[in-house]
Amino acid sequence: MSESKFETVSSLVDNYQQNEAQLDEILKDEQLSETWDRYHLIGDVMRDEVPQTMQFDIAAQIADAIADEPTVLAPAPKAGFVETVKAKVVQFSKPVGQMAIAASAAGLMIFGVQQNVAENDVVTPNQIVQTNPLGGFAEPVSFNYQQTSAASQKQSLAEQQRRFQALLSDHQQQVKLHAQMQAAAQEKVEDATQ
């Protein structure tokens, strides 16, 4: 499109020229017709004559843009040597990692219990808050305050150790069960490949 045609459209929009032949040419040409619409919209905006809501029909433009986009088809991944090696490494390292985490947690718990018992002959719960009241005599902070004796503290320590041993034995049973399940799965894989 030449620049003179756009200038002609602009002059017709601004009512500088009144030529019926040029107006018919603009209405027949799609690009000039769109330019005519845009120029009128620009003029309406400048004169503040735009309606509150405007309707733009952009559905056709979006549909065209989607149709023009290339289609990407990805090939299906092939199970090659690298993938099987990765699967075997993950299969081997997962239980080892789980056992390492469990062993670290168990070691930290044993170390913490031993340190706590070695430092304090009398174990006091962390929930008891020591306060110095203004009246000069101490009262419990809550109604469920209980004075713990040495016997009850030893009993609670024994209960804590019993629960810890139960957790360790449960963990060992789970490790054995997991190992048996892996061995059975490996046998199935070997039987299927033969």
Image (cartoon, helix red, strand yellow):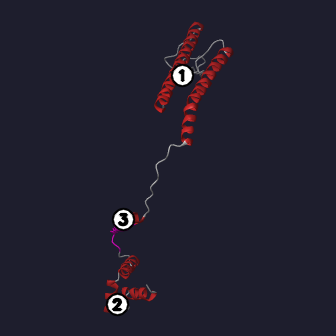
* The quadrant where residue 148 appears: top right
Q: Nearer the viewer, mark 1 or mark 2?
A: 1
**Residue that mark 3 sits on:** 63
**Residue that mark 1 sits on:** 175
Q: Residue at x 53, y 23 (%)?
A: 179
Q: Residue at x 56, y 14 (%)?
A: 165
Q: Residue at x 65, y 14 (%)?
A: 117
* The quadrant where residue 48 appears: bottom left
Residue extending farthest right:
119
**Residue that mark 2 sits on:** 22
Looking at the rendered structure, which numbered label has been put on residue 189? none
Residue 41 x %, y %: 37, 77
> What separation in Å lies between label 1 and label 3 (alpha carbons)?
58 Å
Judging from the image, what secondary structure is the residue with disc 3 in? helix
Q: Is residue 112 left or right of residue 66?
A: right
**Residue range highlighted in magenta:** 50-64
Dot 3 alpha-carbon crowd within 10 angstroms: few under 14, some 14 to 19, many 20 or more: few
